[in-house]
Amino acid sequence: MSGVTILDGGMGQELIRRAGKATGLWSTQALLDAPELVRAVHDDFFAAGAQIATTDTYAVLPDRLETYDMFDRLQELSDLACEIACNARDAHGSGLVAGAMGPLGFSYQPDLAPPASEAAEIYAQLARYQLPFVDMHLLETMASVDQARGGLMGAGVTGKPVWLALSVLDTDGSKLRSGEDLTDALPLIAEFQPEAVLINCSRPEAVSTAVPLIAGCGALVGAYANGFTGITDKFDHIGATVDVLSAREDLTPSAYADFAGQWIADGAQVVGGCCEVGPAHIAELSKRFAA
């Protein structure tokens, strides 16, 4: 890749905006009820200038589906989400598909995740499901070194490129959400050599602190922030919904792109958006920075 690559924005919040409801299954609910909405979101992100579609598989995880007695639909839902993203890419005529894999246990709660050796087996299975469809696997919102290790161990089994997205504290972008220094992940990155390392699903201000700390890691560097005011203590278990979180009102497309410009100046080669970052934000990123 040359120049700046534009990733898509946040699937889950965009689906809630269109469907008008949030459930404990998060964006997986749309795969069950309205897969055409998932396709429409992909289409709109591509139309806005995104060059990579992220599959709607962030929450298609064994522990999430087991909670709702749907474990037996794991591969079915993974395949469906991947097919929708590929079809949108094909209709657009260009682009890549990244197979999302979210954190086991719960987002932002690495203490709830299984140890790396156990997580690796789960991620390996998810990666094998994605293998026929995706161009790369994208481990999202990894919040501790051990959580990232489990993801990298598992996702690497297919031979596809692996992208690692780390999430940092909203109040201190130099630290993972586990409290570990972000730089503690650098030896892990050197060991597994993912194709790209990104900072994701944290406030843009925290991302701005984090990006320079990974800029020399030897991989592609990227960033995609969220638009939440912060993460509350109530958002800490499977079944919790984003109703307990609030969106910022100041993060306009222009304001978000200003942050992205700083990330690029500090070494980011891939920029996009996470929760609450929609097609209008991606259009502004594309207008300013697309290769």
Image (tube, helix red, strand yellow):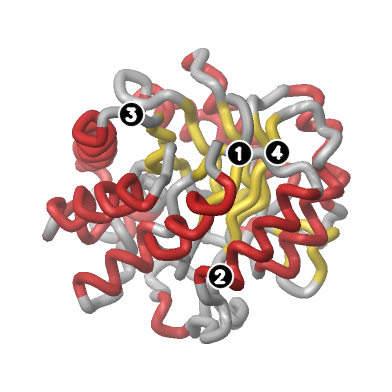
- Disc 1 to disc 2, C-alpha distance: 17 Å
Q: Which residue is painted at 39% across and 75% down in the image?
A: 241
Callout 3 amino acid: Ser
Residues at circles 3 and 2 in contact by the CB criterion of under 8 Å: no
Residue on which the image places disc 2 = 254
| Mark nearer the N terminus (3 vs 1) | 1
Callout 4 amino acid: Val
Residue on which the image places disc 1 = 4
In-front residue for pair 59/247: 247
Between marks 3 and 2 in the image, the one whose residue lies nearer the viewer: 2
SS under mark 3: loop
| Mark nearer the N terminus (4 vs 3) | 3
Residue 246 in view, yes or no:
yes
- Disc 3 to disc 1, C-alpha distance: 16 Å
Residue 113 in view, yes or no:
no
| Mark nearer the N terminus (4 vs 2) | 4
Residue on which the image places disc 3 = 94
SS under mark 1: loop
Residues at circles 4 and 2 in contact by the CB criterion of under 8 Å: no
| Mark nearer the N terminus (3 vs 2) | 3
Asked which quadrant contains residue 120, the reply is: top right
Callout 2 amino acid: Ser
| Mark nearer the N terminus (1 vs 2) | 1
Mark 2, residues whose alpha carbon is within 10 Å: few (<14), some, or many (≥20)? some
| Mark nearer the N terminus (1 vs 4) | 1
SS under mark 4: strand
Residue 92 at x, y percent in the picture:
25, 36
Residue 252 at x, y percent in the picture:
52, 76
- Disc 4 to disc 2, C-alpha distance: 22 Å
Callout 1 amino acid: Val
Residue on which the image places disc 4 = 221
